[in-house]
């Protein structure tokens, strides 16, 4: 059968493939043909192919799929029905719709990135967001880099290179992508000085570890895990007191970082950046694309005397933000000047604070819309469930939500999940208790039309 595999030149003469040459560049079509023939050859060797596999129509169809895949961007929009608001794999925080024009202007034109329009001289790219950050947090100065790991790296490199940094063993976290605090400290040139135990650390542990080699006291938000039971930790206020006794700065890696107290919305236990600074922290680092609801960024706020050296540090150029990210970060921060506006217009905050009652009402409306147009083979059932914050934030918190269970006659939940995931506009949900579900918390009302369009053509496999 392997002898029957056609040559590339012969396949290029097939009418169906000739049509592809009118749509795609010739090198792209040749690559698709070769890849398809290689797949056919592998299937033959593995005993998986039949005579139909070598048929002109079958091979042409596979070439068409290969070309379509090649022409589809790998990084593209998806519909998030997973219920995880800050889904790291899906790009974390979606930006506010009001920033669309801001992003386009920054990307497709020239901008005042490093140009002072008042003086006509060169300016600083940090100035666009520093004033806003200081105004919103009460900090004396601010520095922005490309993510929170970079913020920690820059701060430690600037303040503690070849010096010791004292941190509790219970706070030596590893988050997604194998990012570990000890390894970042090592890269910065700082020397880790662990104190306490995994579950209990006391003020006396810090005091006993301080020596002439100590440069900094560090407190790290545990982000994506929680230690419960027989536990004790040193508060920011206590750590600041210890630092001031021996004239050492205190740094807090706040992780997600929020500028709004979300306790009244049922999201208790997450301190704001302002609260860390009010507690006396000399500098605080946090992310831009988590609870802040902005683009990926690392933000450092705090005392001017500690941040000014960072602005001159060689690492800053390697870690700096691009113009589009700066523009969207500035736009996001501007929304925080009115907290009510931030809660309404920043998608992350809006999704996290939406009430269970409103979600139930939106789910009921969505199901009614879908039932009017979908065939009887598609079953839709509403039920109560729980969403997650994600992004290493509130690891134990489950937020009440409404789920829409979707089933299609003749398809298993796994088959349905796969078909929806592999669309040009992928629709992502989760399988819960043996059923494929979509969580209304991370779905917009506009997503329902796309979900209907995806479910309409789905039929059971023959």
Image (tube, rainbow, N blue to C red):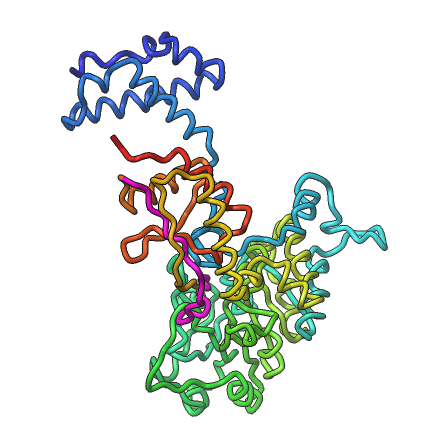
Q: Magenta segment, which residues?
A: 389-409
Quadrant assignment, res 183: bottom left
390 in the magenta segment: yes
Quadrant assignment, res 15: top left
Name the residue nearer the viewer: 244 or 49: 49
Quadrant assignment, res 56: top left
Residue 394 at what x, y percent from top left? Answer: 45, 70
What residue is shown at x 69% (from left), y 45% (from top)? 101
Quarter placement of the C terminus: top left
Name the residue nearer the viewer: 293 or 283: 293
Residue 310 at what x, y percent from top left? Answer: 62, 66
What residue is shown at x 39% (from left), y 50% (from top)? 429
Quarter placement of the N terminus: top left
Residue 158 at what x, y percent from top left? Answer: 56, 68
- State left or right for residue 189 relative to residue 146: left
**Residue at the left extreme of this rendering:** 47
Residue 295 drawn above or below residue 75: below
């Amino acid at each position: 059968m392997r002898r029957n595999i056609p040559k590339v030149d012969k396949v290029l003469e097939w009418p169906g493939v000739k049509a592809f040459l009118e749509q795609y560049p010739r090198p792209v079509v040749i690559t698709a043909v070769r890849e398809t023939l290689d797949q056919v050859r592998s299937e033959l060797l593995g005993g998986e192919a039949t005579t139909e596999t070598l048929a002109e129509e079958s091979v042409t169809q596979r070439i068409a799929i290969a070309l379509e895949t090649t022409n589809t961007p790998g990084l593209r929009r998806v519909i998030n029905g997973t219920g995880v608001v800050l889904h790291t794999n899906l790009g974390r925080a979606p930006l506010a719709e009001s920033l669309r024009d801001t992003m386009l202007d920054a990307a497709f034109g020239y901008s005042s990135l490093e140009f002072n329009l008042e003086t006509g001289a060169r300016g600083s790219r940090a100035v666009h967001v520093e004033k806003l950050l200081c105004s919103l947090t009460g900090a004396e100065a601010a520095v922005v880099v490309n993510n929170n790991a970079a913020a920690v790296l820059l701060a430690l490199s600037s303040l503690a290179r070849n010096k010791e940094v004292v941190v509790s063993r219970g706070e030596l976290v590893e988050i997604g992508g194998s990012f570990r605090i000890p390894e970042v400290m090592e890269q910065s040139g700082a020397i880790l000085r662990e104190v306490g135990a995994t579950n209990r650390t006391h003020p006396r542990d810090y005091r006993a570890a301080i020596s002439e080699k100590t440069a900094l006291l560090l407190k790290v938000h545990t982000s994506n895990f929680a230690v419960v039971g027989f536990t004790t930790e040193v508060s920011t206020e206590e750590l600041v007191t210890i630092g001031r006794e021996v004239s050492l700065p205190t740094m807090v890696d706040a992780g997600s970082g929020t500028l709004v107290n979300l306790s009244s919305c049922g999201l208790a236990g997450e301190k704001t950046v302002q609260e860390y600074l009010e507690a006396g922290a000399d500098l605080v680092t946090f992310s831009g694309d988590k609870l802040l609801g902005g683009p990926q960024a690392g933000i450092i706020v705090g005392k001017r005397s500690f941040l000014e050296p960072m602005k001159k540090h060689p690492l800053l150029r390697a870690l700096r933000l691009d113009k589009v990210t700066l523009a969207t970060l500035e736009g996001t921060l501007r929304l925080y000047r009115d907290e009510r506006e931030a809660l309404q217009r920043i998608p992350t905050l809006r999704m996290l604070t939406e009430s269970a009652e409103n979600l139930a009402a939106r789910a009921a409306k969505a199901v009614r819309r879908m039932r009017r147009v979908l065939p009887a083979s598609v079953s839709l059932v509403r039920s109560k469930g729980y969403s997650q914050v994600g992004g290493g934030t509130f690891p134990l918190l489950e937020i009440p939500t409404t789920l829409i269970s979707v089933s299609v006659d003749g398809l298993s939940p796994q088959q349905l999940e796969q078909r929806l995931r592999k669309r040009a506009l992928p629709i992502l949900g989760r399988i819960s208790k043996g059923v494929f579900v979509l969580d209304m918390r991370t779905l917009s009302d506009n997503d329902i039309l796309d979900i209907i369009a995806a479910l309409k053509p789905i039929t059971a496999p023959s």
